[in-house]
Image (spheres, grey):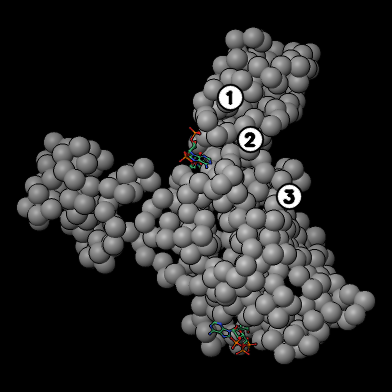
């Protein structure tokens, strides 16, 4: 790349000869990004030199962004190593997390220290279903009922059509929902190691063609919002979406006192009054303290779709004092949408973070790497819940953030 090339490209955009998004057709991806920086710097007066100082070939992000001009760099750290006894992932692992929130990694790291003194955290994936729910128009409720029956009776034909588009995806269910003269069909797939939104969308379109050919229904929208992607929704909290995953631990009373500076009783009370009663009063879907923090930090580190942190916050934290006076804590995330192939996972820094967990790319068997990632995220969330609930119980949330976060 030379500056002249970038300047020449920028000039052609200013002359109206090229559109901003056409530059890669006339130069390599790094030169195109440099030209955009020149244009935006010239237009805004901003200095984009740091945004332009990125450490991977722009071409590597070709499938991830349009109009690229550089890269945002988010600090990346690790917590742990933490011992995990998962259905898929086991042993001691560093957990990569990217964030700008000071005190977050300190908190999750403290939680990991507590988990380790208890022998580690248990974790299991309970369900695996990525969904896409198109909306169909029918004449009236009689036709709506007929379409619902047709879908139930012809799941095999829908499966055949959907699975013709993918060598990995498997259609598991197609569930009709009726609202007047609109019928939604919620298609649910096992997408193996892919988060699966592209895969499920492409497969569902093929199945929709069969429905339109065989019934009187008309497709109105391939996504009818009953999926539900990237919006808070009770259906995800109840039925799950992506991976439904849980992690738990029993922390010895002594560890609660020494590492978490509180008591099992105080943590259990904070959890009940804050995470359960407070969330109920607020009408929240998230009955937890800050599961979204661990989900977001691990999503950014490992190349997940950041908008799906919305669904990752659908979590319930429980805490109780057991018969020995020790503290049992669990976190169940209903709809954690994760993958180790596709999307942002193949970007260079993100795939390095997956490598830290030993789960870069497709697993053997297919789906096992995404399951392992889900379990690792659930353990990070459990550690974060333990530490924050303890900080609230011992009244040092604001002092921690005053010393570490500003
Ligand atoms: C900050 C601590 C951990 C101090 O806690 P502490 O107990 O005073 O720390 P300590 O110095 O005694 O160390 C205990 C352990 O914590 C870890 N640790 C300790 N310091 C560090 C550090 N600098 N970097 C990495 N790890 C650290 C480390 O594991 C250490 O063990 P060691 O290795 O020394 O044997 C604690 O006060 C804490 O966790 N506070 C809670 C902070 C928190 O959870 N913030 C999350 C964000 S809050 C938010 O975004 C959401 C919110 C709050 O609005 C949601 C809601 O409504 O609830
Ligand atoms: N289209 C949409 O509506 C939406 C798209 N997105 C975006 O979709 C992307 C994620 O979609 P996703 O489908 O996960 O990824 P990709 O579109 O990148 O597709 C992943 C593909 O990888 C192949 N593959 C190879 N090995 C495996 C394996 N072990 N397990 C599973 N698949 C494997 C599959 O091919 P094959 O199918 O041929 O077997 C699969 O379709 C993200 O970029 C996200 O931002 C997000 C929300 C909505």
Question: For ligand 1, which image quadrant applies?
Answer: bottom right
What residue is disc 3 on?
A: 126
Q: Is residue 210 left or right of residue 140?
A: left
The response on whether ligand 2 sits within 8 Å of label 1 is no
Q: Is residue 404 left or right of residue 15?
A: right
Residue at left offset 6%, top offset 52%: 4
Return the x and y of residue 256 as percentages of the image width and height.
Answer: 76, 84
- Name the foreground residue: 400 vs 353: 353
Distance (Cα) linking label 2 and label 3: 15 Å
Residue 352 sits in which quadrant?
Answer: bottom left
Return the x and y of residue 350 as percentages of the image width and height.
Answer: 43, 58
**In this view, 213 is above or below 178:** above
Numbered-mark total:
3
Nearest to N terminus: mark 1 or mark 3:
3
What residue is disc 2 on?
A: 189
Residue at left offset 51%, top offset 60%: 358
Distance (Cα) linking label 1 and label 2: 10 Å
Mark 3 neighbour density, 10 Å: few (under 14) some (14–19) many (20 or more): some
Residue 42, label in figure:
none
Residue at left offset 44%, top offset 69%: 76
Nearest to N terminus: mark 1 or mark 2:
1
| Kind of element beneath mark 3 | strand
Distance (Cα) linking label 1 and label 3: 24 Å
| Kind of element beneath mark 1 | helix
What residue is disc 1 on?
A: 162
**In this view, 397 is above or below 169:** below
The response on whether ligand 2 sits within 8 Å of label 3 is no
Q: Cβ–Cβ below 8 Å for labels 2 and 3?
A: no
Q: Cβ–Cβ below 8 Å for labels 1 and 2?
A: yes
Mark 1 neighbour density, 10 Å: few (under 14) some (14–19) many (20 or more): many
| Kind of element beneath mark 2 | strand
Nearest to N terminus: mark 2 or mark 3:
3
């Amino acid at each position: 790349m030379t500056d002249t090339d970038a300047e020449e490209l920028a000039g052609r955009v200013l002359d109206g000869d090229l559109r901003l998004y056409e530059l890669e057709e006339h130069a390599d991806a790094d030169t195109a990004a440099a030209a955009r920086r020149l244009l935006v710097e010239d237009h805004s007066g901003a200095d984009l030199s740091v945004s332009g100082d990125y450490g991977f070939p722009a071409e590597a992000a070709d499938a991830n962004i349009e109009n690229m001009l550089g890269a945002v760099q988010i600090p990346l750290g690790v917590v742990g190593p933490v011992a995990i006894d998962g259905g898929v992932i086991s042993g001691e692992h560093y957990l990569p997390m990217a964030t700008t929130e000071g005190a977050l990694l300190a908190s999750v790291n403290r939680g990991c220290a507590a988990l380790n003194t208890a022998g580690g955290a248990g974790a299991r994936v309970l369900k695996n279903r990525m969904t896409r729910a198109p909306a169909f128009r029918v004449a009236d409720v009689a036709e709506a009922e007929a379409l619902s029956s047709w879908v139930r009776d012809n799941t095999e034909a829908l499966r055949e059509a959907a699975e013709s588009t993918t060598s990995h995806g498997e259609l598991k269910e197609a569930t009709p929902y009726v609202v007047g003269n609109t019928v939604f069909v919620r298609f649910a797939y096992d997408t193996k190691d892919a988060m699966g939104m592209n895969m499920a969308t492409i497969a569902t379109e093929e199945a929709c063609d069969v429905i339109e050919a065989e019934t009187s229904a008309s497709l109105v929208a391939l996504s009818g919002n009953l999926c539900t992607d990237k919006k808070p929704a009770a259906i995800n909290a109840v039925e799950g979406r992506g991976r439904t995953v849980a992690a738990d631990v029993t922390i010895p009373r002594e560890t609660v006192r020494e590492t978490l500076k509180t008591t099992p009783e105080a943590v259990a009370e904070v959890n009940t009054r804050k995470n359960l009663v407070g969330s109920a009063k607020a009408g929240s879907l998230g009955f937890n303290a800050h599961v979204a923090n661990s989900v977001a930090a691990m999503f950014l580190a490992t190349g997940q779709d950041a908008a799906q942190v919305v669904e990752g916050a659908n979590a319930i934290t429980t805490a109780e004092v057991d018969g020995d006076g020790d503290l049992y804590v669990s976190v169940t995330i209903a709809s954690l949408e994760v993958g180790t192939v596709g999307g942002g996972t193949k970007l260079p820094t993100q795939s390095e973070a997956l490598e830290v967990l030993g789960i870069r790319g497709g697993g053997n068997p297919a789906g096992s790497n995404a399951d392992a990632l889900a379990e690792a995220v659930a353990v990070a969330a459990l550690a974060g819940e333990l530490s924050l609930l303890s900080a609230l119980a011992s009244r040092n949330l604001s002092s921690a953030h005053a010393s570490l976060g500003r």
